[in-house]
Image (cartoon, rainbow, N blue to C red):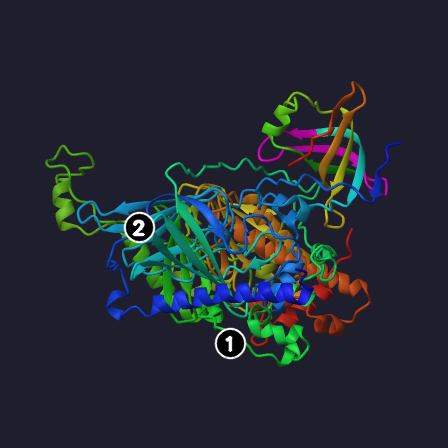
Amino acid sequence: MRRMLLLVGATALVASSVVYAHHSYAATYDVSKQVKLEGKLVQFVYRNPHSFVTVQAPDETGAPQRWAVEWAGTTQLGQAGVSRESLIVGDEIVVVARPSRVPGEYRALMVTLKRPSDGFAWGGPGQVVD
Amino acid sequence: MHMDKFNRFAVRLLLFGAAVLVVVVAGAAIVSVPASAQGGPARPQIAPDIAGEWRLENNEADTTAQPPLGDYLGIPFNDAGRQRADTSAESIWGTPEYQCRPHSAPHQWRGLGGARILKEQDPLSRDVRAYHIQFMRSLDRPVFMDGRAHPPAWAPHSWTGFSTGEWVGNTLKITTTHLKDGYLKRGGPQTSDMYTMTEFLTRHGDLLTIITSIDDPIYQDEPYVESTTYAYDVTASVNTETCSGSAFAENGGSDRHHVPHFLPGQNTALGEWLKTQDWIPPAAARGGVKTIYPEYRSVMSGSVNVSALTVPSSRSANDVAKRIADQSPKDGDVHVLPLQGNIYVLIADGTNITVSMGPEGVMLVNTGSAQMSGKVLAAINQLANSTVTPPTPNTCFGPNCPGAWGWASPYMNAVISSPTPPKPVRYIINTSAAADHVGGNEKIATSGFFPRGGNFGGAVESVGRAASIVAHENVLNRMSAPAGKTAPAPAAAQPTDTYFDEFFKLSAYFNGEAVVVYHAPAANTDGDSLVFFRHSEVISAGNVFSTVGYPVIDAEKGGSIQGVIDGLNHILDLAVAEYRSQGGTWIIPSHGRVSDTADVASYRNMVTMMRDRVRDLKKKGMTLEQVKAARPTMDFDGRYGSTTGSWTTDMFVEAIYRTLQEKK
C-alpha cells in the first residue's frame, strides 16, 4: 500500500542560491520537514522558471490527492540529463519533498525523485532545486 | 569587539535613522526649490539625461533577496498591515490568477534585472513627452511629462499604475496612482490597492539615485521610504519575459479556487529567522512607526513604555477614504467611461450602469436609481448620437452613387437631411432587485422599444412598446405581487423576460455579440445575475463584486457568503487576462471602479479569508458577539469596512456567521 510518510526532523537546508522568482522556496515550503509520496505520475510540466510534477498519492488520511511538486527549471534539469521525455504519465514514482507551509495544501518542493521500474533517479549530490 | 544584542540593534537602528535623515533632508531640499522651478512639465535648470541602460548598484537594505518571513524591520506597519502580512501565504503565487503577475511597483527598482529608461519625444519641439521605464519581468511603465491629469478614481488600476513626472530642480519627481494591490517586500508585507508612490530620481554622473515613498494608510502609519542606486551600464539589458503560467494551479489538490492563507496566529514560521538573529528585539521585528525612529532606544532600554513613546512621524498625504468614495461618486451626476468593444460605463450617482451601444440599439445592465433616470437617459442619447450615428460626409456625387433612392442623390440628402436617429433602448438586464438596479426601469424602459408583435406589429398592448427587461425570476417575485395585492414596483418597471436556471442567453446576437446572463445562486440575494458580453469581453458583475465595500449579503432574501464566493469564482472562470494578469476581460461592479481578473481575484481572496476566519472562530464555539469582538476582518476594514451606513462591517460579519455552511 502506498503510504505517505511525514518525516519531521533535522534536514539539510535547500540550496543557498535562490533563483529570483516571484516566490521564495523558504517562504513557500517548510524546509525542516519532508513528505514521501508514492504514486502515479499524472502530469509533468517541463517549463521555466520551474517545472512541476503532479503525482497522485494519498494524504495522511489515505485519501488520494493530486500533489503538485515543484521542480527545477529546464536549464538545470537539462544539465542533469532530464528532458521532457524523461517522465511519462502513468509512471510509478517515489518523491521526497518539502511540504507547503500552508496547512492542508497538496504542494511540495522536490528533494528526490525515483522511478523504481528502471532505476531513474534525480536528487543525488549537487542535484537540488535552486 | 563583542557587542551585546542591545548595542548591535542600536547601531542598526542608528544607521537606519541616519538613512531616513538623509532621505528627509534630500526630500526637504527637493521641496525647497523655488516655486518657479516647480509644476507642470517645466524644464530643469540643467537637463540631465536619465535615458539609457542602468544596472542595480545597491540599496540600503539589500532587499533584492527575499527577507525572511516575519522580518518587518523598518516598516511603519499599523496593526492591519501587520495582520495582513502575518496571514499572507507565499503559496498564493501558485494560484492561476497570480502566476503571471509582475513584481509589485515598490519592488521594481529593487529587482536584479536592471532598468531601461527610454525617452518619447515630441517630433517637432523634441520635448520629452514621456519616459518609459522597463524592468525585468515587468510591463512598460510610461511616465507622462506633458502635464496631463491623473485619471478619475473609477478608472482601472494596473501593476505600474498611472505616473506623471515633473522636474524639481535636477530631480525628476514621479507621482503614481491607480496601482493594484501587491507587496511592499516579497514574502509577506503587503500593500493595499490604494497606495500612492512618489519617486525622486537624481542623476549624479553615472549614478542614479532613486528615493521611493510608498504611502499606504490602509497598512501603514506613515509613508515607507527606501532608496536605491543604479549605475549607468551600456552592457546592461532588461530581459523580456513572457509568462508561461497556465490555468493549472501549482498548489496541488483538485480545487482550482483554492486560496492559500494563514488564519490569524496560525503562521508559526514568522519568528523562525530570529532564532539565528537573537540580537534583534522581537518587538522591533514586528515593525511599526515607533520602531523606526531613534527614540525607540528608550523603549529597548526599558526607560519608556512603548505606548507612551512619541516619535516625530510624518503624515500620510493620501486621503484613502475620499479616494475610495470617489470610485463611486454620489455627486448627482452621470460620468461616462468608454470601456471596450460595444461597452460604456455610466457612473451614475454611486451606481454603475453598463451600456452596450451599437447599430441594433442600446442594452443596459441596471438602470440606476429612479431620481437619476432623466440624467441617465440624457447621457444615453448623447452617447448614441455621438457614437452610433456620427455625421457622414458625402463622398459620392451624381445619381449613380450607391444608396441613391428615387431622384435625389446622396449628395443632396447629406446636405439637407439630419442624421439617422439612434436606435432606442431595446434591453434592460437587472442583476438584482436592488433599488439602484431597478429604480430607473420604468422611465427608461418606456422610452425604449422592443418588437414583440412579430408579424402582427411592433407592440403588444399589455407592455406597450417598452424595452424588454430581463432578470432572474426571483427579481420579478420581489417586484410583483399576486392579483389583488399591491406590487412593490409598477408593472412597467417589472421584468418582462425571466429565467430560472443556470443561465439565460439572448436568442440572437445583439450589437454583433452574444450576451449571456448567468445566475449567481444564493449570493447577495437569491436573484443575482452576472452578464457576460462575449465579444466585447466585459462582465457586468452586479453586487457580487465591489471595490468600495464588503459584499452586501441579504440573508433574509436568500443571500449567503458561499454564494458570493461562488459568484466571484464564476467571474474568474469566465474572465481571461490580456497579459501578465492584467486587462483582458473587464469586470464592472455595481459599485466601484472598473476592474480586471487580478482585482476580482484579490477581492475573492479577501472574502474567502473572511469566511475561513469566521468559520474557524465559530468552530471554536464563539458566539456571534464574540466573533465580532475578535475583529476577524481587521486587516481589511480600512479598505472595505464601515461603522455607519446601510452595510456595516458588523453586518457583514453577522451575515457570514449566519449563512456559513459546514465545510464539506
The percent coordinates of residue A9 (x first, y second) are 83, 45
Could you say whether the residue bearing mark 1 is in a helix, strand or loop?
loop
Q: Which residue is mark 2?
A: B130
Q: Which residue is mark 1?
A: B312
Looking at this view, name the residue that lies furthest to the front: B1
Q: Would you say residue B551 sits in the magenta stretch?
A: no
Label 2 Cα crowd, 10 Å radius (few <14 / some 14-19 / many 20+) = many
Q: Nearer the viewer, residue B97 or B123?
A: B123
Q: Would you say residue A44 sits in the magenta stretch?
A: yes
Could you say whether the residue bearing mark 2 is in a helix, strand or loop?
strand
Q: Earlier in the sequence, mark 2 or mark 1?
A: 2
- In the picture, the quarter occupied by the N terminus of chain B is bottom right
Position above or below: B233 against B635: above
Q: Chain of mark 2?
A: B
- Magenta residues span A43-64
The percent coordinates of residue B156 (x first, y second) are 44, 55
Looking at this view, name the residue that lies furthest to the top: A118
The percent coordinates of residue B502 (x first, y second) are 62, 47
